[in-house]
Image: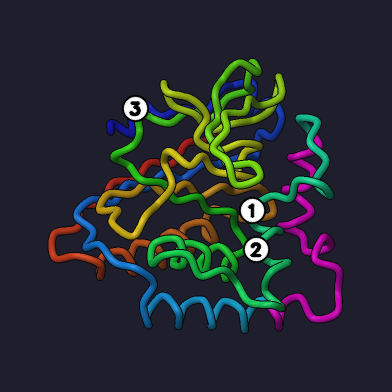
């Protein structure tokens, strides 16, 4: 994938000019399921999140509130379809999900640094990713009631997509099955979504923890990254 071809449409930046997308590709990862290292990261993230949340409503955390505003800007109802950061924070008390090593790693970093992060299998992309306002005709492969189904986003919905269809609906709400990370994934794309009040420095710290972690997942790991902003 050529990250230079990735883009965020002007129609998205018009909703939130403060938006930044940091795209990171990682190739040469040794395959593996959840392990002791990813478990330790999740436990640490749960501990820090519980201390942060305390007794206050999760929606009052500034980073959560900012993303709720972004969802409202394109017509989504954040109390019904929660952005990925809020969804994870609401699972902290009962324990974050354990999925696979790569997913566990980025979920832990998402919660620790209060930033939505997506992770996808790079080999399953048909073109470079782009963030657009959907027409409503784009296919999105998912599951409903235990069955494989193809859905379509609402017109105007903010979605990540490639030439084959939607890879993530509602900015960072739900990922497609086609590009999902698996135990045998060896090449991954990570998308770090930043809005104010997250600073560029805070975004950089989240990215550096991710980079330091994935560098340990193989002897010949190759990493590229690109920051896309208005």
**Secondary structure beneath disc 2?**
helix
- In the image, residue 27 sits, relative to residue 59, either above or below, namely above
Name the chief secondary structure element in magenta. helix
Q: Depth check: 14 or 36 in front? A: 36
Q: Residue at x 69, y 54 (%)?
A: 197
Q: Which residues are magenta?
A: 50-72
- Which image quadrant for residue 136? top right
- The alpha-carbon separation of the residues under discs 2 and 3 comes to 29 Å
**Secondary structure beneath disc 1?**
helix
- In the image, residue 59 sits, relative to residue 146, either above or below, namely below
Q: Earlier in the sequence, mark 2 or mark 3?
A: 2
User: Does the magenta run of residues contain 56?
Assistant: yes
- The alpha-carbon separation of the residues under discs 1 and 3 comes to 24 Å
Residue 126 - label: 3
**Secondary structure beneath disc 3?**
loop
Q: Position of residue 64 (x, y in %)?
A: 74, 57
Report the residue marked by disc 2.
88
Residue 84 - label: 1
């Amino acid at each position: 994938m050529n990250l230079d071809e990735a883009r965020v449409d002007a129609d998205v930046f018009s909703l939130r000019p403060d938006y930044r997308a940091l795209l990171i590709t990682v190739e040469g990862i040794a395959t593996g399921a959840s392990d002791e290292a990813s478990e330790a990261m999740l436990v640490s993230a749960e501990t820090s999140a519980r201390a942060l949340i305390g007794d206050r409503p999760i929606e009052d955390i500034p980073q959560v509130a900012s993303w709720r505003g972004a969802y409202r800007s394109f017509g989504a109802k954040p109390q019904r379809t929660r952005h990925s950061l809020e969804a994870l924070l609401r699972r902290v008390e009962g324990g974050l999900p354990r999925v696979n090593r790569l997913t566990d790693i980025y979920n832990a970093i998402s919660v620790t640094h209060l930033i939505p992060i997506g992770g996808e299998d790079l080999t399953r992309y048909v073109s470079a990713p782009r963030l657009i306002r959907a027409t409503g005709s784009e296919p999105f492969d998912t599951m409903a009631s235990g069955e494989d189904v193809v859905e379509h986003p609402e017109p105007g919905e903010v979605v990540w997509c490639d030439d084959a269809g939607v890879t993530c609906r509602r900015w960072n709400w739900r990922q497609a099955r086609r590009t999902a990370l698996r135990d045998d994934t060896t090449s991954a794309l990570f998308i770090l979504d930043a809005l104010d009040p997250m600073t560029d420095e805070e975004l950089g710290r989240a990215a550096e923890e991710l980079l330091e972690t994935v560098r340990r997942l193989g002897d010949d790991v190759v990493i590229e990254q690109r920051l896309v902003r208005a």
